[in-house]
Amino acid sequence: MESDRNNKKRKKSPKTHLQLNPNWAQLQLKLKSNGFNKFSKPTKDPESETQNSILGKRKDRPEAESKLNPLTPTNDDFSLTDVVAMDCEMVGISQGNKSALGRVTLVNKWGNVLYDEFVRPVERVVDFRTKISGIRPRDLRKAKDFRIVQKKVAELVEGRILVGHALHNDFKALLLTHPKEDLRDTSEYLPFLKEGRRKSLRHLASEFLGVEIQNGEHCPVEDARAAMMLYLKNRKQWEKSTKDQIRLQQKQMKRKPKRKPKKKEAVNV
């Protein structure tokens, strides 16, 4: 019985090979021609591998290259804070050599815009100074009247610390005044001066904030934010020096004038 079983096993027909799908066979040939093997991994060029990996990292982490602009507001708080910054843009009137207010911007300490309006001057504009001011004729067609803007600005800055650059020019155009002890002018702050000379806001922003501004037409929103950022970075020392200066002035005011020496009585001869 066992011999019969062995004979049956021997008499079994040989295994028939299944015919491959023509598409599969074509794919295998293509892989072999490209250097791929079933049991070996394809070799890679080390140079191309490093290039691909570097590019891959750049694509995966685009934020590593792009630097955040420090002038961008960090929140959505548009409240009227104890400190505000102002910047104005001027246009030319009369014969073009006289300046008038063309736009005024106020931002809070977070850099969010509190007020930003184009202004229609009382006199006719003869020079829009677009290359610097960024103001065009179409901007003043529906601009607000000077007196309305003047009143609104006065309300916003009243009783608050006002930050800006060369603020005397802005107040001259606005026909307003502000208490000197509440002014924080980046053009007059001693650590920002170079050998007693004032620096432009553009140079201060580049040197102390690492930000490029005023490359072409000026943006009053950006300029006001730059002045505010310069103040906030130096606020502690700035406020200390301001208080010391006020105390010194008060002491000088309290000092009594020296008595004049009494004239000697004339001797009658």
Image (cartoon, helix red, strand yellow):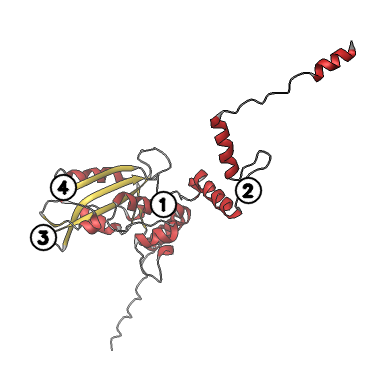
Whether the residues at callouts 1 and 3 have beta carbons within 8 Å, the answer is: no
Give the residue at mark 1.
Answer: 229
Q: Which mark is residue 138?
A: 4
Q: Amino acid at mark 3?
A: Ser
Q: Residue at position x 43%, y 51% from top?
A: 232
Which numbered disc, 1 or 3, marks the residue that appears first in the sequence? Answer: 3
Calculate the distance from the C-alpha at mark 4 to the C-alpha at mark 3. Answer: 20 Å
Rendering coords of residue 15 (x, y %) = 71, 23
Report whether 149 appears left or right of 18.
left
Comes first in the chain, label 2 or label 3: 2
Question: Do residues under tags 2 and 3 come within 8 Å of each other at their CB atoms?
Answer: no
**Rendered position, 167 above or below 56:** below
Which residue is depicted at the point 39% across and 58% down? 205
In the picture, the disc for residue 94 is 3
In what quadrant of the picture does the C terminus appear? bottom left
For the residue marked with disc 1, what is the amino acid? Answer: Met
Q: Tell me, yes or no, if residue 124 can be seen here.
A: yes
Please tell me whether mark 1 or mark 2 is closer to you in this view: 2
- Name the amino acid type tagged 4: Arg
Instruction: Indicate the amino acid at tag 2.
Output: Thr
Mark 2 packing: few (<14 Cα in 10 Å), some, or many (20+)?
A: few
**Quarter of the view holding residue 241:** bottom left
Is 119 or 242 nearer to us in this picture? 119
SS under mark 2 = loop
Spot occupied by residue 5 in the image (x, y as percentages of width and height): 85, 13
Viewer-closest of 46 and 88:
46
Q: Is residue 107 above or below residue 194?
A: above
Alpha-carbon span between mark 1 and mark 4:
31 Å
For mark 3, give the secondary structure: loop
Please give the residue where the numbered disc 2 appears in the rendered image: 43
